[in-house]
Image (cartoon, coloured by chain):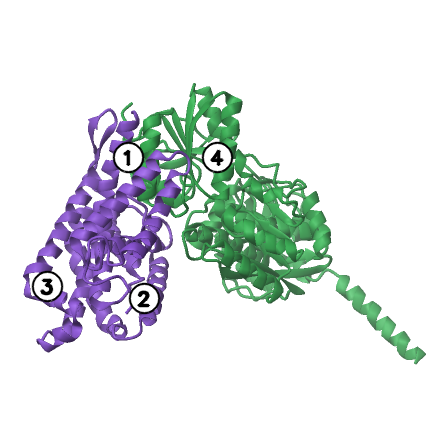
Chain colours: A green, B purple
Amino acid sequence: MKRGIKVFTIMALLALVFSLLPGQTLAQEVTCDSEVVVQADDWLSKIAEKFYGDVLAFPAIAQATNAVAADDESYTTIENVDLIEVGWKLCVPSTADAEAMLNRSIGAAMAEVEFDGIIRIGAAVSETGSLAQAGEDTREGYDLWVDFVNHEYGGIQVGDQRYGVEIIYYDDESDADTAANLVERLISEDQVQFMFGPYSSGLTMSTSAVAEQHNIIFIEGNGSSETLFERGFQNLFATLTPASFYTRSAMDLFAASGVQTVAIAYEDEPFSASVLAGTQIWAEELGMEVLAVETYPRGATVAEIDPIVTKLKALNADVFVGGGHLNDGIAFVRSAKSLEYCPQAMVLTAGPNFPEFAEELGADAENVLGPTQWEATMGWVGAYLGTPGEYDRRYQAMFNSVPTYQSAESTAVGLALHAAIEAAGSMETDAVRQALRDLDIVTFYGPINFDDTGKNVAKPMASGQIQDGVFTVVAPSDAAVADFKFEPLSWCDG
Amino acid sequence: MNLSDLILQAVINGILIGGFYAVMMLGFSVIWGVMGVINLAHGEFLMVGAYLTWVLNRQYGIDPFIALIVVLPAMFLLGYIFQRILINRIIERPFLIALLVTYGLSVAMASTVKLIYKADPRVTDTALTGFWNLSDGVGIPATKFYILIAALIMMAGLYLFLQYTRLGKSIRAAAQNKEAARMVGIEIGQVYAITFAICIALTGAAGALISPTTSIFPFMGPVLTLKAFAITAMAGLGNIPGALMGGIILGLVENLIATLVPGVGSNLGITSSFILLVVVLVTRPQGLFGGLKPAEAR
């Protein structure tokens, strides 16, 4: 018996020693087929794509570079495949060598990595109903993160284990009660460990309450209404800038341009109500007078919006600030044009940032302003997914459409959970919750730092304007790529 | 702009949208009156007409008003096909079956359109734009005026058809008394098919007309179906002049309340249409102007 244990111990020690040896003896024989100096906006998978036509072949480049870096200091040792810097010299091995390193043929789909487990996340998003369009953006944002974690990042690191992620989706039909029921189902029946939020403050209101009851962490990126965070919830975290800040930078622009009166009209639901409540605060702060505050019902059509435009025309305020979601934003522009309502400037709370706004309205969209949480032209640089430009390219390659800020803030939701789990080294709710509270990172989406109520207080809100058919960031000054044009709307005379 | 100007503009808006409402709900009303089927997919047929117009507008540059030439026959065909394969089977059945089937149809149609065109809102462009100033900011929006004209022409056409043509009279006969109509040799199946097709054509045309004024998306149907209900109750089943009056009444009530009540006016406007519906159903179920028969389940 004693001898058996001795043998076993020696075997175990030998196994341990062998496991710690560097695995690739091939590394000594690497020759660099090409050398690459990293340029701005490069990332490893892009270089892999360029040389091998296979985005997932990047580990070969990293491996080869690290191998030659051991001998040749002009090459950099790559510690983290997600972070390469401009000016680094990389070694790109031949396709044959790369194939040997990866133990597969290049260009083939990557074999499913063996994860130590799967993290189950639930999400009710709008696939039908009036919010379907932005619901799709939300889902694509989540899916991009899932794909990144499972196929590039190699799984979330929890201690020394790697976990893949899976999101279970249901269609909430743009209805708050349906969404709440689905969340109940996701938590109780599907046993998800974490929840991601739906699109819109209205749906987030009901769904986050269900998650709070079950003590499940609920991270969202598409519900910005202040009322969400006034309920004392412990498990709610939001990556986006809160609603009351949406029109801040536009109002600053107006004040600087001498505007004195504002007319407000909005869709009667929590998000728009928060945005426009904020607008009234900024108006007061900046010394502008609010002449009217009108509301219209959800899902409003031209029949509901025409009377509002008629009223606002009679009031003749300098500028108009309002709206709700994309549908009524478009209807508003059409209605204003048909009734010849001509404020000096128009801010729509959700609309101009969507490419569809300018595409559908054409020349009518010119000079309309809108707030934006994020644009691909901004300058953030983050862990995991790089810059907004890189995110934009990645998104386009995956979905064949341009990412909106709704997609970006959804991906940021995934990143927040990702970073928190890795920081906590655990998937236990209490540990992850504390890690989320302590989180202070910069992502491609901007800074993420939650306050005690779950709001992201580190991220500023920008304003954009449709200029020559393109949504261009004009404020605040450190994010602006062009100047604000205080010019009449396209159907109005100067 | 003072108060009287505001009221005047509200009245103008109300009449214009009222005319549109009339042509929008007429298809719903006639189907109910003639066939006893409450078509819950009504708004979705309108939406399909709107999307068809959008495709013609975006891909071929055809103005929505001109696109009517294509939309009317296309929707007629669509209606005929749907009637033959689906609606025909539910006409003689219990009333709830019609509701279930047409509701399922509405969901299927909206989801199919969403799959093809995504949920992004769309608009069409028309050359008939402008605003005719009457005085001091009050005026008539050109596009909506032309929509009213087109609506009136179509309603007049339907009225003349029902009053004076043989087929039209057969339709009215079938609505009044199906058995008697059969007895005098009217081919009821054919009558129903043509009726349904005409109504869908009209509804699709309404979709074409509304397309330049508002955003088009796959789930725009339900609110319009609800308004069709409200106006049908006021107008009486299948009553064309009643539809016009009912549409205008609704348009005026909505617009006057929405324009004159500050703050929540617009919300009250849409509420008022349903309050009106309830009041009319309780006090005068055959409609304010009478109709083919009272609005009731068979």
Q: Is residue B167 visible?
A: yes
Distance (Cα) linking label 2 and label 4: 40 Å
Density class for disc 2 (Cα within 10 Å; few <14, some 14-19, many ≥20) is: many
Q: Position of residue A45 (x, y in %)?
A: 54, 52
Residue behind mark 3:
B168
Q: Amino acid at mark 4?
A: Leu
Above or below, comparing residue A78 to residue A381 in the picture: below
Q: Amino acid at mark 3?
A: Gly
Q: In the image, is A40 to the left or to the right of A435?
A: left
Q: Which mark is residue B211?
A: none
Density class for disc 1 (Cα within 10 Å; few <14, some 14-19, many ≥20) is: many
Assess whether mark 2 and mark 1 are in contact (beta carbons under 8 angstroms). no
Q: Amino acid at mark 1?
A: Lys
Assess whether mark 4 and mark 2 are in contact (beta carbons under 8 angstroms). no
Assess whether mark 3 and mark 4 are in contact (beta carbons under 8 angstroms). no
- The disc numbered 4 marks a residue on which chain? A
Q: Residue furthest top?
A: A258
Residue behind mark 2:
B102
Residue behind mark 1:
A337
In this rendering, the label closer to the viewer, 1 or 4:
4
Q: Amino acid at mark 2?
A: Thr
- The disc numbered 3 marks a residue on which chain? B
The quarter of the picture where the N terminus of chain A appears is bottom right
Q: Residue at x 19, y 66 (%)?
A: B34
Residue behind mark 4:
A276
Distance (Cα) linking label 4 and label 3: 54 Å
Q: Are marks 1 and 2 on the same chain?
A: no
